[in-house]
Image (cartoon, grey):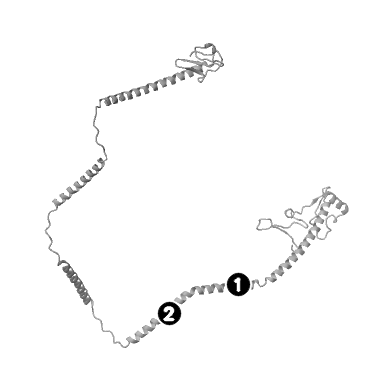
Amino acid sequence: RKKNTAWYELWLPGQDEPEYFRKLGRGMVPDEVRDALRLDEVLLENGSQVDVHIGDQKKPIFLLDVDGADARLAEFFAASSEGAHLLAMQKALHARVREARIRERSVARRMEELQCGLDRLAALPEITHRGRLAREAGNAAQSVEQSLPGLEQALARRQELEQQAGHAQKRSRALRSLAALPELRETDRLRNALARLAETSRCRARAMGVSRALEPLQPVPQLQTTTDLNTCILELNHLKQKTKFIRSKAEALQNMQYVPEVYNVQPLGGLLQELTSLDSRLAAAREAAKGRARQLEDLRRQIQDRLEAVGTCPLCGGRLQADTFTGGGEVAGHVCEGSTERGPAAPKEGGHDR
């Protein structure tokens, strides 16, 4: 608001810039501002609206700014039907004010208690600072203690260097009275000659040692051919292997019995021939048994198919099944309910020829 103008700035949630409303006229409020602040007008039963939130600066409040204010006031409370709510709101407001005052007093007492506690803890920063200094001093002392062995080594090294320096000074004072060194000449040829002389001395000493070691030896005998000796060695090895084989064979034959005397073997040969023929006959019998088994299985399938084709017994009306169809060999029959015999010998009691 300025001296001659007024406008609205509406800051909505999530926006970086406000929304401006200017040149609205005297006493006019934008609908956006009313919606944002929830300042809607109250609708009466006669269709008129009353603004209970916003009014002119120099006019009476709502319901009292026009003629017939009493009637309009009654219409407002009758139309809104919220007089009891307003009274309840007023009571709730008084209760909230009372609770707020009580809470304010308790908060004030709590503040006083906290202030007393803070007063007692006023020296805590100084104590913390001194503790930090003491901790730093302790760390420094610990670091110094850790560096003591190095300092001791450095001091020992210093003493050793001082002793060496003293010896060097004494040596220097002793050497001052000596004459200057003579001029050096080329010594490479002399050095090479001395090296050759030393090598020659070593070779001479080695040769003398070898000569003394060879003096007691006899002359080398004349070498003979080794062909015959190699042949003898091969024959000897072969004889050793043959002897080992014969010895192992003899050890294996010591525990054996003598060979029994051979008797007449003709009956044994006949028995072998008979066993051979029995084997062939047994194989043929097995093949015949397999064929009979196949034939029996075919007959069983034929009986099953025939029973399934007939279906029921013509005498008893029972179902013909393979497990109730009895018999063996060339005769078979169906056992009817209540019968005691089976097969074609007793047809009246339920038996049927196959």
* Residue in the picture at 45% in, 18% down: 299
Residue 329 sits above or below residue 271 on the image? above
Give the total number of marks visible in the rendering: 2
User: Residue 131 at x, y = what percent?
Assistant: 60, 72
User: Residue 256 at x, y = what percent?
Assistant: 26, 38
* Residue in the picture at 71% in, 67% down: 114
**Image quadrant where residue 165 sits:** bottom left
Q: Secondary structure at mark 1?
A: helix
- Disc 2 crowd rating (10 Å Cα; few below 14, some 14-19, many 20+) is few
- The residue where tag 1 is placed is 131
- Disc 1 crowd rating (10 Å Cα; few below 14, some 14-19, many 20+) is few
* Residue in the picture at 69% in, 71% down: 120
User: Residue 25 at x, y = what percent?
Assistant: 76, 57
Amino acid type, label 2: Arg
- The residue where tag 2 is placed is 158
Residue 294 sits above or below residue 27 on the image? above
Left or right of residue 23: residue 174:
left
Left or right of residue 331: residue 268:
left
In the picture, the disc for residue 112 is: none
Q: Nearer the viewer, residue 338 or 124?
A: 338
Where is the N terminus found, in terms of image quarters?
bottom right
Amino acid type, label 1: Gly
**Image quadrant where residue 251 sits:** top left
Residue 55 sits above or below residue 258 on the image? below
**Image quadrant where residue 179 sits:** bottom left
Left or right of residue 351: residue 88:
right
User: Residue 38 at x, y = what percent?
Assistant: 75, 53
**C-alpha distance separating marks 2 and 1:** 38 Å
| Marks 2 & 1, CB-CB < 8 Å contact | no
Q: Nearer the viewer, residue 287 or 345?
A: 345
Q: Secondary structure at mark 2?
A: helix
